[in-house]
Image (cartoon, rainbow, N blue to C red):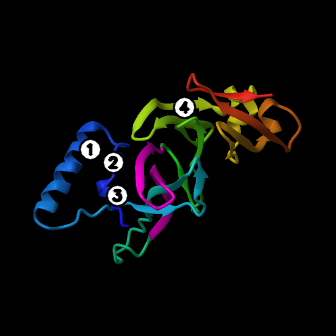
Amino acid sequence: MFYKFVDFVNYFKYRNERQVDRIQARIAKRQSRGKDYIIRTKSTMQEDLISYQDKLYVITESYVEEYRNNNMGVMYPRDAFRTFDGYRYLHATITAFDLNGRKLWDNTIRIKRLKEYTQRENLRIGFIGDSTVIAYVEQNKIQSKLVHRYRTVGEQNSQRIGDILGDERINLSNSVQLKHWYDDYFLIWGEHPYTALGEAGGSGFFVSKIKYTPEKQIVKQH
């Protein structure tokens, strides 16, 4: 079985409604001419398939490569001084399959202000019954969203990690990692600088268990 992203219900839904309508019109126009619509962004698929309640979940993260021009004030070929400036992530797609490989549903989450200079897996998913929690770390925040199959149950929510854990130092960390543990529980860890609060130099390590609640908020678990 072969599935195209352009046929997914929610693949382009990280964009606003007007943009989605324009894309759908372009797809229909090209298909009427017997041509494929070309998606310009690139995607990577996370290595591990996630198994839950007789379903397999595939996560793909879409990005564009960014470059900056180093203007040397001399005449050289246009690309001579282009420097790679990172992978800017745009959105991630979660696709559920049954154990025979038949697609059941898809959903997506917009990725905001996330740029990496090496590719890595950013998105994590958890579960509340038949619904799916989608989450990722963006700078000093956790972005999260609750979906039920094709439908969005809880709109995308942004929470400062320091507020969740009750420690402002964590808001200055740039090394936070997020991992799904079980059900609707996640683990979060990283380093925070002591100097943020005028203490002696160095850094401290933190790790905490967090939970996505029915109120569509992430809270610390003791």
Spatial CA span between label 3 and label 4: 27 Å
**First along the sequence among labels 3 and 2:** 3
Disc 4 is placed on an element classified as strand
Tell whether position 106 is magenta: yes
Q: What element carries label 3?
A: helix
Q: Which of marks 1 and 4 is nearer the N terminus?
A: 1
Q: Distance between the residues labelled 1 and 3?
A: 14 Å
Residue 50: quarter of image: bottom right
Q: Is residue 33 left or right of residue 109?
A: left
In the rendered structure, find residue 20 and report the number of the disc placed on it. 1
Specify the amino acid type for callout 2. Answer: Phe
Callout in the foreground (4, 2): 2
Where residue 150 appears, x then y in whole percent? 39, 41
Judged by depth in the image, the label closer to the viewer, 1 or 4, is 1
Query: Marks 1 and 4, how far apart in space?
Result: 23 Å
Residue drawn at point x = 34 percent, y = 73 percent? 78
- Say if the magenta span includes residue 9: no
The dot on residue 12 is 2
Where, by quadrant of the figure, is residue 178 drawn? top right
What residue does disc 3 label? 5
Amino acid tagged 3 = Phe
Position of residue 198 relative to residue 47, above or below, is above
Between label 3 and label 2, give the one nearer the viewer.
3
Disc 4: which residue: 158
Q: Is mark 2 on a helix, strand or loop?
A: loop
Type of amino acid under label 1 = Val
Label 2 environment density (alpha carbons within 10 Å; few <14, some 14–19, many ≥20): many
Q: What stretch is highlighted in magenta?
A: 82-111
Q: Which of pointers 3 and 4 indicates the residue nearer the eye? A: 3
